[in-house]
Amino acid sequence: MLVVNILLILFFVPCFLFLVRFILYRTALILVLRKWMNWVDDRIHVHQYLKVAELNENGQDNEFYRRVFLYINSLPSIEDSNFTNLFSGKKSTDIILSLDDNQVIQDEFLGARVDWVNKVERFDHGGVCNRSFLLRIKKKDKRRTLRPYLQHIHTVSDDIEQRRSELKLFINNGPSENPVNGRWRSVPFTHHSTLDTIAMDADLKNKVKSDLENFIKSQNYYHKMGRAWKRNYLLYGPSGTGKSSFIGAMANFLNYDVYDIDLSRVSDDSDLKLLLLQTSSRSLIVIEDLDRLINEKLTTTTLSGLLNFMDGIVNSCCGDEKIMVFTMNSKEQIDPAMLRPGRIDVHIHFPFCDFNSFKYLANNYLGVKEHKLFPQVEEIFHSGATMSPAAIGELMIVNRSSPSRALKSVITALQSNGTEGKIGGKGKRLSDSASSPLRLEPPPHAEETGGANWKDSVPGAKEVRKLYGLLRLKSCKSPSSFDHDPGMIER
C-alpha cells in the first residue's frame, strides 16, 4: 500500500507542476510573478544609479548616449516593454523596435541584472527639456561588472553601426519649435550620386578625390600644426549645374552624415554656434544658397556671426573631422573676408554645359556614345549656346525611350535659348591677388605656397526652364567651360 501511495505522489506532483507551469505561461500570471520577484529583490539590495545624458555640459552631443541608444534598442527584452515604438527599416520588410519615453528595459550581464530607463523630462508646453538613459545596477555587482559592461556596450554598438552603415541627413529646427528630438531631426541619407557619376573634368575630379583622401588621413598633421581638423569648400555657379549632387557625392565618398543648416530657422549668431556644437564628428555641414540669404537679408545671422561660424573658436570645440560646404550662384557680391583662405580652402566653379559635358550626359542618360546628330549639337555649342545640366538631363529623361528624339529636343531647346545661353560657358581669369586657390594638404608646402586661381564665371543668364521639374542632376565640367592650371596643386 505504501508503495502505491508513493507512486501516486510521484505521478501527481509532476502533473501538478506541469499544470501550474502551463497556466502561468498561458496567462499573464507568469509576468506578474516575475515582477513580484524582481520587486522583492529590489527591496533587499541597494542600487546605484548612473545617468547617461544626451548632451554634455557644453551642450554638445554625448557620443556614449548614442551608443547606449543603439545597444538598448537591439536587446531582445525590448519586446517585453510596456510601450515600444515600431518603425519601418531601410528595407520595406524590416521592422525596427524603439523604446518609448520613460519606459524600463532589463538586461543581464555576467549573471547580474541591470535596468535601463529611457528618461524624458519635458517643458510645460510639451517640448523636450532633457533626455537621458538611467542605468540602475546593484552595488554588490558594480565593482565586478560595471566596467566590462560599459565596454560591452561599446563593442556591440560598433558592430551595429558597421552592419547598418546608414548615413543620415540632419535638418535644424527653429529654436521656438520645441521639437521632440532636439534642435536636429534626421532622415536616412539615400542620395545615389557618387564622384564617379559626376560629370567633371577627369583631372579636377582626381584632385578633389586626392584632397578628400588626404584630409581624412591628416588628423596628426592638423593637430601638430595647432589647427582644427576641418576643411571648407565653396561650390559656386548658376542654378541647375549640380552643386547639390556634388555634395551628395562627397558624403557618399567619405561616408559622412550631412547637416543641412537652414539659416532662416536660426535666431541669431549664438544660436548658429549652438547648432554647430551639436553636430557630430565625421560629418558634412552644408549651407546652400548663401549669397541669396545674405543679399536678400533672409537670415537674422550677421556677417560677423557667419565669419565666426566658418573659422571661429567654436570650430575647435565641436569635434574633429568635419567638412563645411557652402554653395552660391555667384560670389561677386560677397564680402572678400568670407572667401579668404582659412574660411574657404577650396573653390570649385560649376558652369553651364559645353559639348564635352553634353556627351557625358548623353552617355549617362541615353547610353549613346556617338550619334549622327552630335556634329549638329557640337556646332550649336560652338556658336555660344548653352544650357544647365539639369535642363538637358531632364529633356533626356523624358525622351529616354528614343535617343534621336531626345537629342532633337535638346537641339531645339539650345536653339530657342539663343544668345542668352552664351554667357554660361566661358569665364575670365582672376588676377593673382584674387580669391584663394585650390590647395591640398597634408604636405606643409601646400599651406605655404599658392597656385593658379580658378576662372570666375559670368552670371546673369536665364536658362531654359522647359521640363525642368524638380530633378537636380549631376554637374558638368570640361576643359572648355573653365580652365585650371595643371600645376595649381602643390604636391
Image: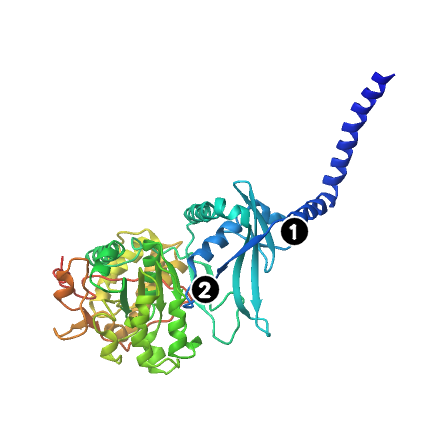
User: Which one is nearer the viewer's eye here, 146 or 360?
Assistant: 146
Q: Position of residue 23 (x, y in %)?
A: 77, 38
In the rendered structure, are the residues bearing label 1 and label 2 in contact, judged by CB atoms less than 8 Å apart? no
| Residue farthest along the right direction in this orientation | 1
Residue drawn 59% across the image and 74% down it = 125
Label located before the other in sequence (1 or 2):
1
Residue drawn 76% across the image and 32% down it = 17
Please give the residue where the numbered disc 2 appears in the rendered image.
55
Residue 168 placement, left or right of 6: left
User: Which one is nearer the viewer's eye here, 203 or 302?
Assistant: 302
Quick one: label 2, few (<14), some, or many (20+) residues within 10 Å?
some
Q: Position of residue 245 (x, y in %)?
A: 35, 61
Question: Which of the two marks, 1 or 2, is nearer to us in this view?
Answer: 1
- Residue 417 seen: yes
User: Which one is nearer the viewer's eye here, 330 or 163?
Assistant: 163
- Quarter-wise, where is residue 257 in the image? bottom left
Q: Position of residue 265 (x, y in %)?
A: 44, 75
User: Which one is nearer the viewer's eye here, 310 or 459?
Assistant: 310
Q: Is residue 15 above or below residue 264?
A: above
Q: Is residue 61 above or below residue 46?
A: below
Query: What secondary structure is marked by label 2?
Result: loop
Q: Mark 1 and mark 2: span between their CA atoms?
A: 32 Å
- Residue 375 seen: no
Residue 74 placement, left or right of 459: right
Residue drawn 57% across the image and 53% down it = 47
Please give the residue where the numbered disc 1 appears in the rendered image.
43
